[in-house]
Image: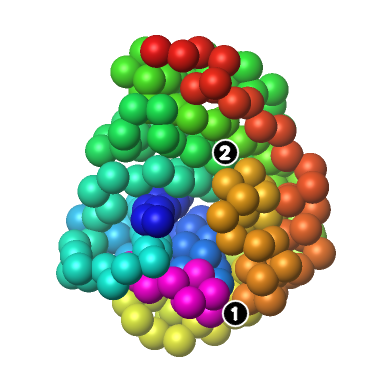
Amino acid sequence: MHHELTVWSRGIIMDKEARDVSTCIATAARQLGYHAENVSDYVDDPDRTNCLVRRYARFDTEPILDRFVYENPHPDWIVLVEETIVKAVNFFRGTEDGKGVLVVNSAREPEYLLKFLPKHMLAKLNKLVVVDATGLAEQRGSSPWMFVRDLSELAFDRMSTEGAVERLAIGLGIAAPLIGALVAATGVLPVEVVAEVVADKDAMRRGAEKHIVIEYAAANPQ
């Protein structure tokens, strides 16, 4: 069994959220006995405010041989930290037809989001998972343009990049419900095992319980 997770986010202001999703998935998989990797985006760096950035995790029952390949060649789990990315880039590049599980942080109806995917991307889609991670996360601070984090926390984020130790707990804010929705929708990693490595366990469980799934491939056979 092999899975590749690519998390798409916006540089600097949402970078930690992407790191937290990939880190928690890789850490939980490793604790369950899988071989796992968690890498940053060396392709698009240096990241800039609001520019697209990616974080990657992959895990397998067998040893991972491409440990120094930074991009996931065949991502089957894709997480969009904010909804406008759904129309910004081909995040299904390399995904096999009918295999992609797409998790989007949005309060919109899934059918509305599907309208932004062209036919060649819809062919890659297995499941669309929509979760209002912003609404389900614990509010911290008073800066809504950055979802649930205070502006001062960005300074800690910048000190946590490029292999440095994280200055803030891993799995806070909108990352927690996103992780919960991803884990519940895919069913590969047990929710409670993943919750052990997520800082905001309550918000993660809310995401696991309160998301919408469209089984696109099953409803639209090729």
Q: Is residue 46 magenta?
A: no
Task: Give the amino acid type for the residue marked by disc 2 in the picture.
Answer: Val
**Is 102 on the left or on the right of 120, as rendered?**
right
**Is 177 on the left or on the right of 218, as rendered?**
right
Q: Is residue 36 magenta?
A: yes
Residue beneath the point at 25% across and 55% down: 71
Residue beneath the point at 67% across and 50% down: 184
When the figure is inspected, residue 119 is found, relative to residue 58, above or below; the finding is: above
**Is 68 on the left or on the right of 146, as rendered?**
left
Residue beneath disc 1: 168
Q: Residues within 10 Å of mark 1 (few under 14, many from 20)?
A: few
Asked if residue 146 can be seen in this view, the reply is no
Q: Which residue occupies the extreme bottom position in the image? A: 165
Q: Position of residue 76 (x, y in %)?
A: 40, 43
When the figure is inspected, residue 198 is found, relative to residue 97, above or below; the finding is: below
How many callouts does the rendering have?
A: 2
When the figure is inspected, residue 70 is found, relative to residue 86, above or below; the finding is: below
Residue beneath the point at 47% across and 18% down: 116
Between 182 and 163, the residue placed more toward the observer is 182
Asked if residue 79 can be seen in this view, the reply is yes
Magenta region: which residues?
29-39
Describe the element under mark 1 as helix, strand or loop: loop
Describe the element under mark 2 as helix, strand or loop: strand
Residue beneath the point at 54% across and 75% down: 32
Between 209 and 87, the residue placed more toward the observer is 209
**Is 24 on the left or on the right of 3, as rendered?**
right
Task: Give the amino acid type for the residue marked by disc 1 in the picture.
Answer: Leu
Residue beneath disc 2: 104
